[in-house]
Image: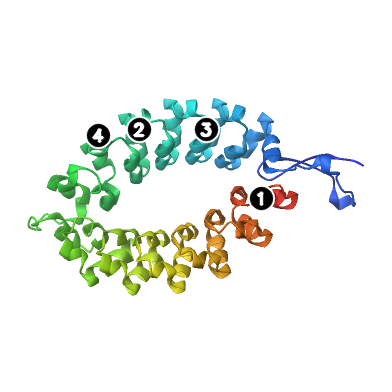
Amino acid sequence: MLCWQRWSRQGILVETSASSFGLHAPSCCLPESQDALRGTVRDRERMFAAVRRDGRSLNLADEELRRDRELVMVALQSDGSALEFAAPELQADREVVLQAVSRRGVALLFAAAELRRDREVVLAAVRQDDRALRYASQDLQEDSEMTMASRQNLGKMFEFGELKRDHEVLLAAHGQQIKPQMPPPEDHWTTLATIGEHAKAIRLAPPEVRRNREFVLAAVRQDGHVLSCASCKLQRDREVVLAAVSQNGLSLEHAGTDLRDDRDVVLEAVAQHGLALKFVSTELTWDREVLLTAFAQDGRALEFAPGDLRRDREVVLAAIRQNGLALKFASPALQKDRGLVLFAI
């Protein structure tokens, strides 16, 4: 019986026969497990084709190819977050890391510690995505140049160091948003509230403001994650939490325990961000509608499903339909399922 090579859309080699001709490949021609599948990407030329399409295909490369500097650089050109899958020595390579953070700033998270202390590397990361500042060394988090580079998102900027109390930084960051004729504010949070920046203001506001329901509602509608700044009472307020998770599903992390067990709140959260499944009550992780809603948004939410459901072929299939990488969270037996492996790639 004939057997020959076929390449997937991602450039991954699959040994199979032509079903369109009514032939069936013997089992020796198909990968028996995900490990076997990874072994099929050893062909360097095909791996280049894969990472050009999707840099994170580097995840499927073997250790030798993850040490291939040229291959890794191509992957990073496609998606800077592929730095996660590079060999440790390349995560410590300054040129490689600069390539990564210039494409995706938060890839700084995967850089070696010494490069997270490197001023040029961190500045490049912050200019691409201000959230990268949280992954820099402590001294650089408090550096005025770094903070100014992240001024496009002032709320995040003021999370770091003593600069949160620096009035000149506040004014410079707002630029045209603060009119010259406006009198100097008594404090920063009132300035932000005055121009309608409630989500940014609440990070700086005193405790009594964080207990103000109207103010907190306005804030979480702008940025659900600032639910973390609200008082404990408001983190248990159903309307406040619903507003927060509608804007950012991951804010479910900061909701009161009872609301993590509220089916409507949970469905709203996982529909907005599938990985919010991580913060759902144990009971609701068994709810199929909750699971399928989460998987429809991000198949990787399979990681947070109960073990028994990760052995359920139908459940796993729903997850990998959205993201083939979810297969790594399936049970070992289903990771060896040829049909699921082929579907995942």
- Residue at label 3? 86
Residue 128 vs residue 286: left or right?
Answer: left
Neighbours of disc 2 within 10 Å: few (<14), some (14-19), many (20+)? many
- Residue at label 4? 139
User: In terms of sequence position, does the residue under pointer 2 or pointer 1 come before the other?
Assistant: 2
- Residue at label 2? 116
User: In terms of sequence position, does the residue under pointer 1 or pointer 4 come before the other?
Assistant: 4
Residue 191 vs residue 323: left or right?
Answer: left
Please provide percent x and percent y for residue 20: 85, 52
156 vs 140: above or below: below
Res 1 quadrant in image: top right
The numbered disc on residue 75 is none
Is residue 12 visible to us here? Answer: no
- Residue at label 1? 344
The type of residue carrying mark 3 is Ala
In whole angstroms, how far apart are the C-alphas of marks 4 and 2? 10 Å
The type of residue carrying mark 1 is Ala
Please provide percent x and percent y for residue 109: 41, 39
In whole angstroms, how far apart are the C-alphas of marks 1 and 4? 43 Å
Q: Residue placed at 51% from the left, 41% from the top?
A: 79
Q: Nearer the viewer, residue 135 or 335?
A: 335
Q: Residue placed at 31% from the left, 62% from the top?
A: 227
